[in-house]
Image: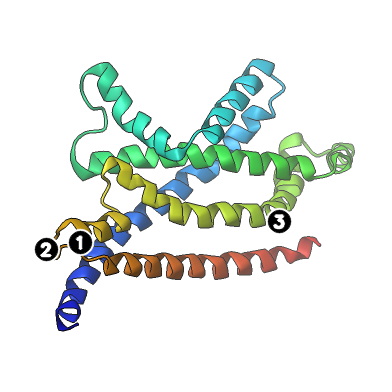
Amino acid sequence: MELMLEQVPIVIRSLNVGFLQTLKLFFVTLLGAVPLGLAIAFGSMSRFRPLSYFTKIVVWIIRGTPLMIQLLIIYYFPGLVLGKPIWGGGESGRFLAASVSFIFNYACYFSEIYRGGIQSVPVGQEEAGLVLGMTRSQIFFKVTLLQMIKRIVPPMSNEIITLVKDTSLARIIALQEIIWAGQAFMKGSQGISGAIWPMFFTAVYYLIFSGILTVLLGRLEKKLDYFR
């Protein structure tokens, strides 16, 4: 017991470093996937059929295959084809590859949520806007977008909470996020070997972060109740 208490500060420091990497991947994914998802949604709803079909096929492939496989393909495949890695070496290269994989994956999921939210707004509101002399862009930003945001918050919240846990998949390409840091103590790290209890600590990090996000997203949903 005394030995474990002596090891706790070492474990916490290592988990903090891993959790910072997890946070970076989480926020970078959101910053990239939220706008990209809207662009993909527009592509899938485009009246230009080749673009619409192409976008829908890409979304179908991304949503139909595991994120872990996408990580492996994006990180390793270009290097196998070109004969040299395109992401660079070290932790920064792995983080860049993981970011691209996560952004594209979650953008495809977000695009379907956007599309559902946009199409759920009654067509009569667009027609009324046109009668009032509004342009289609004005109708989208002043009428459709505001109502869409209210409708997509619950499903987007679920995806965002899922993203918190999915960041752990980045360890498949050896990105040193929090799960990687916890597992290192089972294999032997900083003089600690065969210890499984650090993995329980990682669960606490996820629970706290997910709890904070749940509260914040819940408050956002309540603030958008004026559309009822």
What label does residue 150 carry, if any? 3
Q: CA distance from mark 3 to mark 2?
A: 48 Å
Residue 196 coordinates in the image, percent (x, y): 27, 65
What label does residue 219 carry, if any? none
Look at label 1 and name its amino acid. Answer: Phe
Q: Residue at x 53, y 40 (%)?
A: 107
Per the image, label 1 sits on a secondary structure element best described as helix
Q: Is residue 214 left or right of residue 22?
A: right
Look at label 3 and name its amino acid. Answer: Lys
Looking at the image, which is closer to me, 2 or 49? 2
Image vertical order of residue 159 relative to residue 209, above or below: above
Which residue in the protein does label 2 denote?
Answer: 190
Which one is earlier in the sequence, the residue at label 2 or at label 1? 1
Q: Residue at x 44, y 70 (%)?
A: 208
Could you tell me which quadrant the N terminus lies in?
bottom left
Per the image, label 2 sits on a secondary structure element best described as loop
Q: CA distance from mark 1 to mark 3?
A: 44 Å
Which one is earlier in the sequence, the residue at label 3 or at label 2? 3
Quarter of the image where one finds residue 95: top left
Look at label 2 and name its amino acid. Answer: Gln
**Residue depth check, mark 3 versus mark 2: number of the one nearer the observer:** 2
Residue 179 coordinates in the image, percent (x, y): 32, 57
Let me know if residue 194 appears in the view. Answer: yes
Which residue in the protein does label 1 denote?
Answer: 185
Residue 155 coordinates in the image, percent (x, y): 64, 52
Looking at the image, which is closer to me, 194 or 192? 194
